[in-house]
Image (cartoon, coloured by chain):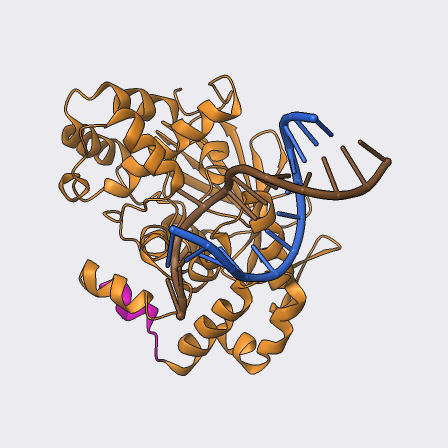
Chain colours: A orange, B brown, C blue
DNA sequence: GGACAGGAAGTCC
DNA sequence: GGACTTCCTGTC
């Protein structure tokens, strides 16, 4: 993999990464793991993470340009976020090995070949998946947007304003503001999460290093966090790729394709990626004809 | 047109 | 196992 950097016409820094395999920006940002990046154009996604507004442009299947970011910041933050520090071919081989000649997984791995499991911020992931319960993706996005606008720091970019994801402290200092979000019963869950995170009662960095069952226990001390939300936080926010969230879609998949049962504890270190392939495959079929027009299978 | 049931990356009691 | 906030969709 290669990376070069420079300046855009307007003066903003960029980093251009080449030699990518198994990366499709559309599949990665629209597979339901991440709610704050919006598609602004074909193969272009923009949004705020780590307190920074950035734009991702995949102009070629093997190439991604990250705008608004210099080389040092890429190496420190975005490389890890995008999992460009990971040998994805080897990861996929591990998943394939755990599924043997399973035809469903083979199809799902082809269908969503460009999906990467992003490494997002733990606290943001916790709040996002608390809000996701019993909810649909467009509304989840809106709720998170309203949450950021209410509590987050404004981030200016090219004359427009986005908002950083709020800190737990900011929310805990004024939890009454949560009532304005129209998040329903989930508002008090967020308040509890903010209080526990701000007070140190919940230490997400510690959870990231703890054994899986302990991490799950720690996360489940937050009201509104059960096994499914905990697994999502572990998978998307704590870098625990072995976590396998089971939601209504996954129950559907398991019943439909694995009527004899699938031992979720035997799927290896990247079970969570297998879960994401199946999830994306099933969702895609529900939405209509397969094929995203993306770069995944390139 | 507008009412209404059903459902949405679940969890609580 | 029913209730839960809010919102959106499909149906009549």
Q: Nearer the viewer, residue A173 or A294?
A: A173
* Residue A257 percent across, percent down from the top left: 27, 25
Query: Residue A108 sits in which quadrant?
Result: top left
Q: Nearer the viewer, residue A60 or A224?
A: A224
Q: Nearer the viewer, residue A46 or A181?
A: A181
Residue appearing at x 52%, y 25% in the figure? A287
Query: Residue A92 sits in which quadrant?
Result: top left
Q: Is residue A267 visible?
A: yes
Count of labels shown?
0
* Residue A125 percent across, percent down from the top left: 43, 57
* Residue A31 percent across, percent down from the top left: 46, 37
Q: Is residue A1 visible?
A: no
What predominant SS class does the magenta segment belong to?
A: helix
Q: Is residue A146 above or below residue A43?
A: below
Residue appearing at x 31%, y 53% in the figure? A231
Check residue A203 for magenta coloring.
Answer: yes
Q: Which quadrant of the rendered structure holds the N terminus of chain A? A: top left
Check residue A5 for magenta coloring.
Answer: no
Please state the extent of the stretch shown in magenta in the rendering.
A201-209
* Residue A198 percent across, percent down from the top left: 44, 79
Q: Which quadrant of the rendered structure holds the C terminus of chain A? A: top left
Q: Is residue A53 left or right of residue A195?
A: right
Q: Is residue A161 above or below residue A187?
A: above
Q: Is residue A171 left or right of residue A224?
A: right
């Amino acid at each position: 993999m290669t990376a070069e950097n420079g300046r855009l016409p307007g003066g903003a820094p960029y980093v251009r990464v080449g030699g990518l395999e198994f990366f499709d920006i559309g599949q990665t940002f629209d597979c339901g793991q991440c709610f704050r990046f919006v598609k602004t154009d074909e193969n272009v996604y923009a949004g705020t993470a780590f307190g920074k507004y950035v734009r991702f442009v995949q102009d070629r299947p093997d190439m991604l340009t990250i705008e608004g970011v210099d080389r040092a910041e890429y190496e420190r933050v975005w490389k890890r976020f995008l999992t460009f520090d990971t040998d994805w071919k080897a990861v996929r081989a591990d998943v394939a090995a755990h599924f043997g000649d399973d035809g469903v997984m083979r199809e799902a791995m082809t269908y969503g070949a460009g999906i990467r499991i992003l490494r997002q911020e733990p606290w943001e992931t916790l709040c996002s998946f608390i809000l996701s319960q019993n909810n649909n993706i467009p509304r989840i996005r809106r709720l998170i947007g309203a949450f950021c606008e209410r509590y987050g720091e404004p981030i200016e970019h090219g004359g427009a304003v986005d908002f950083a994801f709020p800190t737990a402290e900011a929310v805990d200092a004024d939890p009454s503001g949560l009532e304005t979000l129209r998040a329903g019963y989930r508002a008090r869950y967020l308040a509890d999460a903010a209080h526990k995170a701000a007070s140190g009662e919940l230490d997400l960095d510690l959870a990231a290093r703890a054994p899986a069952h302990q991490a799950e226990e720690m996360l489940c001390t937050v009201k509104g966090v059960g096994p499914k939300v905990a697994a999502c936080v572990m998978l998307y926010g704590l870098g625990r790729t072995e976590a396998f969230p089971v939601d209504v879609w996954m129950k559907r998949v398991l019943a439909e394709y694995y009527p004899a049962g699938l031992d979720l504890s035997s799927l290896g270190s990247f079970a969570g990626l297998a879960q994401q392939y199946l999830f994306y495959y099933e969702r895609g079929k529900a939405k209509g004809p397969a094929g995203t027009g993306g770069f995944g299978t390139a």
